[in-house]
Amino acid sequence: MKPLLFSAAALAAACFLLPGARCLAASPQITGAEAVAEVAGDGEHVSRVVLSYDFPIDAASVTPDDYEVTGRTITRAYPVEGQDPASAAPKTGSYVVLELAPLPLVDSSVDAHPEDGPIAQRNAMGHMGPTLGSHGNPQPLPVMEAQVVQVGLVKTTAGLLCAPSASQKTTSVRELVVEDFQQAIFQDPAQGGAALAYNLYIPKNYNPEKRYPLVLFMHDAGAVSSDVKTTLVQGLGAITFSSPEWQAEHPCFVLAPQYDTIIVNDLYQHGPELERTMHLVKALTQQYAIDTNRIYNTGQSMGGMTSIEMDTAYPDVFAGSYLVACKWAESSASALARQHLWIVSSEGDAGAMPSMRAILKDIEASGVTVRRQTISADRPEADINRDAASLITPTCSIYQTIYEGGSHRSTWQHAYRMTPALAWLFTQKRTH
């Protein structure tokens, strides 16, 4: 049962009911509220709210029932201290962290473009998906904020009672991992100074005397936008490789270009942005200590299609590719057969699934082994990862994970959590 809001008289009476509690004319109070946002498979969401108080809070007096966050479920509440309460361990301090239950994944919010249907169906409808060079349907990024209220009594370490508060909106936000990227604009001298906005993660403790892998992530058509951070917050493609957990084991650069136009189409044509991206990759290898034998590309939908064309047109650049919910011309099979690939498709993806089936059939006909698995994306993550790890053999360079059912857009909500596949990618080196 949730605590009720207290009147001044009730608060005064409570001073005598809580052991060791003392009341002052000016009671301790909340002095600020910050939202902490994290990226999930379907976009960015508030995962925590951090309240600041003007006195250190007694950990024993704080419970999730002492607070409410509109529309969300609080799973933990605990005080912390220090300048970085969002990542600190629970400890008595002047901040209280409210951890929120994750929101369910929402398939329909990810991609607003008609990339789902088979090509024959789209031809009959008189269109071929997003138009090359068009600006898509950009949407403003959601504002990361929360409405929070303290509804119970909490106590300071000095025994003072902090009364229930008025409802208030968070006034600042931290975007975990997203905030670790730098934003810049590449002016391509080979294309008359044409611009390409991009996000770049530089490994912490970067040492120019070492050599680091680079991951190039390219977003889907639904993330086409002039806002450079859209590619970072629309899903896990860039975030997974720059997360503290991944970087602890695999320090690397992560490059996430932001396209403001459709750069490939369903006629398997591409715009100048593809070459511009390749020129950007080359420029970064000249600026930073990047291991040119360990450059990887990955992308979902439009981004995966771009990855395939890059592997076809530039077969000696990438050590491996992670291709998610994408398709391309069957003629690319001969070039792809010589690459290291992990392909992720959903049975319900009427565009990507038949395309990749045809490409892989041609690859196998050339004598190259392809190992496959079909799994449910709803299974526990540990089970999926165990099965993915069991698929890997030293003699195979091309793999496909097929999600039962699923859809075009749901594929990438899960694909970038399949850690063994991503770890396999990082073992690949360019051999050409």
Image (cartoon, rainbow, N blue to C red):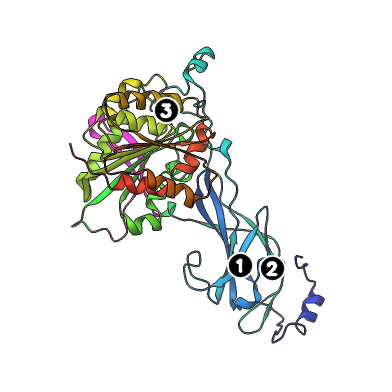
Which badge, 2 or 1, is on the more N-terminal residue?
Answer: 2
Q: Which residue in the structure is indicated by mark 2?
A: 66
Q: Label 1's element?
A: strand
Which amino acid, mark 3?
Ile
Q: CA distance from mark 1 to mark 3?
A: 44 Å
Q: Which residue, as the protein is rendered here, is positioned at the far right?
A: 9
Instruction: Tell me the number on the disc at residue 262.
Output: 3
Q: Amino acid at mark 1?
A: Ala
416 and 160: which is toward the camera:
416
* Residue 407 in view of the camera: yes
Left of 200 or right of it: where is 338?
Answer: left
In-image side of 211 versus 226 (left or right): left
Front in this rendered view, residue 303 or 352: 352
Q: Is residue 394 above or below residue 329?
A: below
Q: Nearer the viewer, mark 3 or mark 2?
A: 2
Instruction: Identify the residue at horizontal 61%, vertical 67% (top origin).
Output: 77
SS type, badge 2 = helix
Residue 53, picture quadrant = bottom right
Give the spatial CA distance, label 3 vs label 2: 48 Å
Marks 2,1: beta carbons within 8 A? yes
Q: Amino acid at mark 2?
A: Asp
Is residue 289 shown above or below 81? Answer: above
| Left-right relation of 424 to 158 | left
Reply yes or no: does residue 387 show up in magenta.
Answer: no
Using the rendered view, name the quadrant where residue 285 is placed. Answer: top left
Mark 1 packing: few (<14 Cα in 10 Å), some, or many (20+)? many
Q: Provide the residue designation for mark 1.
A: 77
Name the foreground residue: 324 vs 359: 359
